[in-house]
Amino acid sequence: MLEVKRFVNELMSSNCYIVWDNSSKECIVIDPGSKDSIREIDFIESQGLDLKYIIITHEHTDHNWGCVSLKKRFPNAQIVCHKECSNMINHESSTYFRLYYDDPNYSYSIDKVDKVFDSEEFCFDFTNHTIRLLYTPGHSMGSICILIDNLMFSGDTIMLFKPYINKRNGSKKLYKQTIKKLIVKYRDKDIVIFPGHGDAFNFEHYINNNGIITSH
């Protein structure tokens, strides 16, 4: 059985999730966005968990600032993201800190991503489960959703409000196409969505909240 623990990241209030299997004690961390990941590290160690993967839903720094700290503490954990995210992640970091951080000399970079995929869908094993990574461009060109059993971790792709999409590294057209595909494919599958910001919900709540008209 999978368990989920949410932490609200600092500097900006994005969500980080720890997902673990009670029988194997193996875990993954999704979107560690706090600089030192202190709470996440403490939780993993206090629960006796074995960190296997650090998965990044997209390249914006409020979703990956803690990767380096986690990797330093758990060197065998693999950082995973889409190729577009890997290509852009350090560029986005430099932009982010110029806008939001109070130290003009501060720098942050992820030197290596261990597992990169460049396809519409990519699957790999996690204890007795399958992690399914879905390429969902729109909010950014490196955005993914993560599906494990009936749990979907959607980053900034599916939220109860429409994400900001800038022309530099996103596409409103692709975003609309992505949302349509996800609704058509997954709305009837009793999925719980854990977004990059805010509380969990399901597809019906998302559709009703956002006034989306479907043929369903």
Image (spheres, helix red, strand yellow):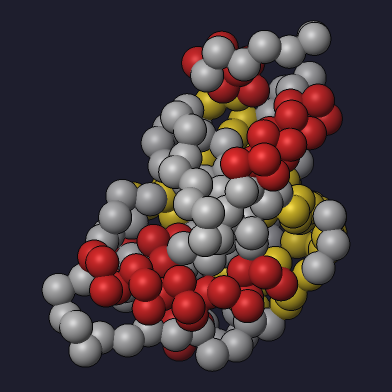
Residue 11 percent coordinates (x, y): 26, 61
Residue 102 percent coordinates (x, y): 14, 73
Residue for point 50% across, 16% down:
209
Left or right of 28: which side holds 35?
left
- Res 94 visible: yes
75 over 39 or under it: above or below: below
Residue for point 45% across, 71% down:
92
Q: For this rendering, which residue is in front, 23 or 13?
A: 13
Q: For this rendering, which residue is in front, 166 or 150?
A: 166
Q: Quadrant of the N terminus?
A: top right
Residue for point 72% across, 39% down:
178
Residue 19 percent coordinates (x, y): 57, 53
Residue 33 percent coordinates (x, y): 39, 63
Left or right of 137: which side holds 73?
left
Q: Quadrant location of residue 94?
A: bottom left
98 over 1 or under it: above or below: below
Residue for point 81% across, 68% down:
118
101 over 25 or under it: above or below: below
Count of numbered tags:
0
Q: Quadrant of the C terminus?
A: top right
- Residue farthest left in this picture: 102
